[in-house]
Amino acid sequence: MFESYDMKSFGMYMRTVRNSLGLTQGDVSRLTRVNSETLRKMENGKTVPKLETLGYLSVAYKQDVLAIFSFFRTNQELYELYKELDYIIVSNELERLNDFCDNLIKIENDDEKVNLFNTNELDQLKMIVEGIKLLNCESNRYHDVLSVLNRAIHRTLKGFKVDRFEYYKYNQIEKRILLLFAVTYAELEAYAFSNKLLFFLMDISNGDRFISQIDLFMYIKVIFNISYNFHEMDFFEDSLEYATKGIELCLKNKTTYLLSGLLFRRAVSKKNLQRSDADSDFRKSIELLNVMGQKALKEIYIEKATELYGYVDTPT
């Protein structure tokens, strides 16, 4: 089946990636074998790039551009599914997972729609959903989660071995699977390996230049989990450092995503380091949850801060 692509959207995306790296078209041309005129046409949606061109750009942009290109097929429904699952993985809004599953079932039962999808893509989506559900169930089936995630990533990354993760290039959804691997290994108390995965995800990102809000949220979540893992390893200075980095990133980008959790994590690190200003961060974290209307989580934070760290809540 011949596939068509939304070249205008792909071109805009590639221009955003280039700008996020602080590169001009001339810079990219010097770093690769792609001439500036080809880059200009591609970014303006006027040409379909050759496979070798996408390969050269992958090196300069530090991303698997060929895999990214596949996301811009004119099968908009697949693109929307990826965006929704991406949001669920990064935001952990599990209540949206059931709706996502219902959409997958509808597609599978629609003979006309299902033919628009690659079997590997649908199977990968279903496996990721299965992994997320297992990860968040109460039966601690973490080895089952690893098995499911391994099968999921093999659908698009043949030969993948998690202990050699640094030798592969990843598309956007595969990066999210890596994040789920990292979270699962932390649940298995393999905190050092979890952090190796998380630091790798930091390294292959665009630094503090974010292409989308989801990329920003992903980066914050990675930092949050690094801080958590350091705490579990009793590396409190490191936990404090990364919690602070996450807080600064939230403030710089004017987002409250995971901010209360990062403030709480920093407060815990300060308590363990016997810093006098720990209660201030506990208070900020709890007050933020109150403002955001997250009453149940607020009560959990108050209980933990009080019972484990001697925090005294003062009603406002």
Image (spheres, rainbow, N blue to C red):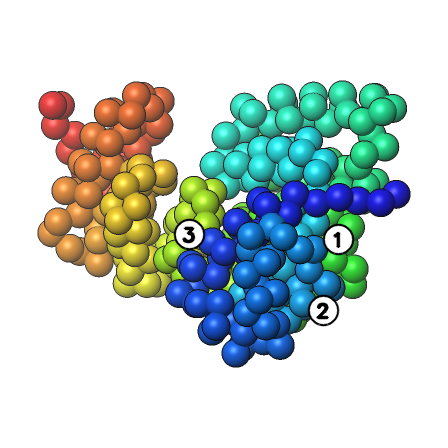
Q: Position of residue 232 (x, y in %)?
A: 41, 55
**Residue 257 versus residue 291 in the image, above or below:** below
How many angstroms separate mark 1 from mark 3 (CA)?
Answer: 25 Å
The secondary element bearing badge 1 is classed as loop
Q: Which residue is mark 3?
A: 210
Residue 31 visible from this viewpoint: yes
How many angstroms separate mark 3 from mark 2 (CA)?
Answer: 26 Å
Task: Tell me the kind of residue under disc 3.
Answer: Phe
Q: In the picture provided, is 120 more to the left or to the right than 11?
A: right
Q: Position of residue 74 (x, y in %)?
A: 70, 38
Q: Position of residue 40 (x, y in %)?
A: 55, 61
Residue 182 visible from this viewpoint: no
Closer to viewer: mark 1 or mark 3: 3
Task: Tell me the kind of residue under disc 1.
Answer: Thr
Q: Which image quadrant is residue 6 in?
A: top right
Task: Tell me the kind of residue under disc 2.
Answer: Glu
Residue 52 is tagged as: 2
Q: Which residue is mark 1?
A: 156
The secondary element bearing badge 2 is classed as helix
